[in-house]
Every structure is written in C-alpha cells, then in structure tokens.
Amino acid sequence: MSAGTKTAIFLGVFVALTSACSSSSSSGNQAAPAPSLCATDSRAQTYSAGMEQKGAAGALSVKLQSIDPNPVIKGNNDWKIQVVDASGAPVSDATITVKPFMPDHGHGSSITPQVAAGADPGTYDVSLLNLFMPGIWTVTFDVTTQDNVTDSSVFTFCVSD
C-alpha cells in the first residue's frame, strides 16, 4: 500500500470519527452532563458562616466567619476566621500557619497564605489562599497561642473545574 493510500485512509477515518463525535442527534436527545467532581465527593464540606472545626488536641477551634468567594474557587480565596479556646473564648495574638494541601495529589500550593489580625477579638484575615487546581483541598490551620497552647484544625473543600 502506498503512502498516499495510507494517508487517504487515515484522513477518511479521522473525518468519520470527528464528524460522528460532533454531530447532534435529530431527536434532540443529548447525554446528560457528567456530575461535577465536587458533587460526587463525600469528603467535601459545604461552607456555612460560623462552621467550626475543633482542633485535633481539643484545646482550640477554628471558625470560618466568611469566605470570598463563596463557594471556594480555583485561584485565590480570602477567608476570615476566628480562633476560640475550649470554653469558646476568642484567642487573640495567636501565631497561625495555613497549609493548603491536595491529599489525592500529594502536594500543596506554592503560594504561602498570609494571615493578619482581624478587627474583632480572635479574628484573623487569611489572604492568598491559592487553590490552584480542581479537586479536594484540605486547609490546615496550625495555631499557637501566646501561652504556647498548640492545636490544628482542618477544613476540607472541593474546588470545581
């Protein structure tokens, strides 16, 4: 078989396949869109103002006061959090490290989130929380108080395509 014949056969098969994939049904029936990656992942939490994650040690908790945008998106997100002790009292002047991580991929974000004291007692503004790709993200808040009490709270969200 000549090279020209092989090329002609390849082009014929290519055109047939691509036109079959792009043609629309005359009956108007179309396949339902695939469910969102996030809609089918039971690990993902749904944001609500004031949602709280108790620390692993039980000494502190982190409450999400607000997130912008809502829901979380691919790219930069800004969160306002409040840290409280076991009795529910606000914890001011804490040192907080924020660690975004994709457990399914085994990596974090190359951008370090910034944390600044908020206007209200125990509140902190988190900026540059960069969730740069779709999928499940855990966001861990490692908190150390002035009295050297340490604890970690984890939120799990899904970023859509």
Image (cartoon, grey):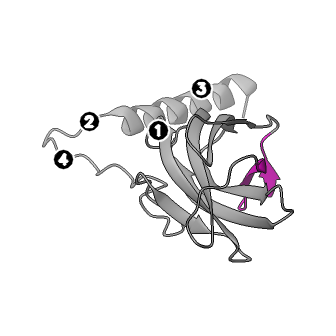
Q: Residue 65's spot in the image, x, y percent?
A: 49, 47
- The image quarter containing residue 103 is bottom right
In the rendered view, tell whether residue 25 sits above or below residue 7: below
Q: Residue at x 76, y 67 (%)?
A: 151
Q: Residue at x 37, y 33 (%)?
A: 22
Under circle 3, the secondary element is helix
18 relative position to 30: left or right:
right
Q: Residue 159's spot in the image, x, y percent?
A: 54, 47
* Mark with earlier residue (1, 3): 3
Q: Residue 69's spot in the image, x, y percent?
A: 47, 34
Under circle 4, the secondary element is loop
Nearer to us: label 1 or label 2: 2
Identify the residue under disc 3.
Answer: 8
Nearer to us: label 1 or label 3: 1
The single residue placed furthest to the top in the displayed view is: 4
Does the CB distance between marks 2 and 4 fall below 8 Å? no
Identify the residue under disc 2.
Answer: 24
* Mark with earlier residue (3, 4): 3
Identify the residue under disc 4.
Answer: 29
Quadrant where the N terminus lies?
top right
Identify the residue under disc 1.
Answer: 17
Q: Residue at x 67, y 31 (%)?
A: 6
| Region of the chain picked out in magenta, as a range | 94-109
Count residues near mark 2 (Cα–Cα under 10 Å), then give few for <14, some for 14-19, many for 20+.
few
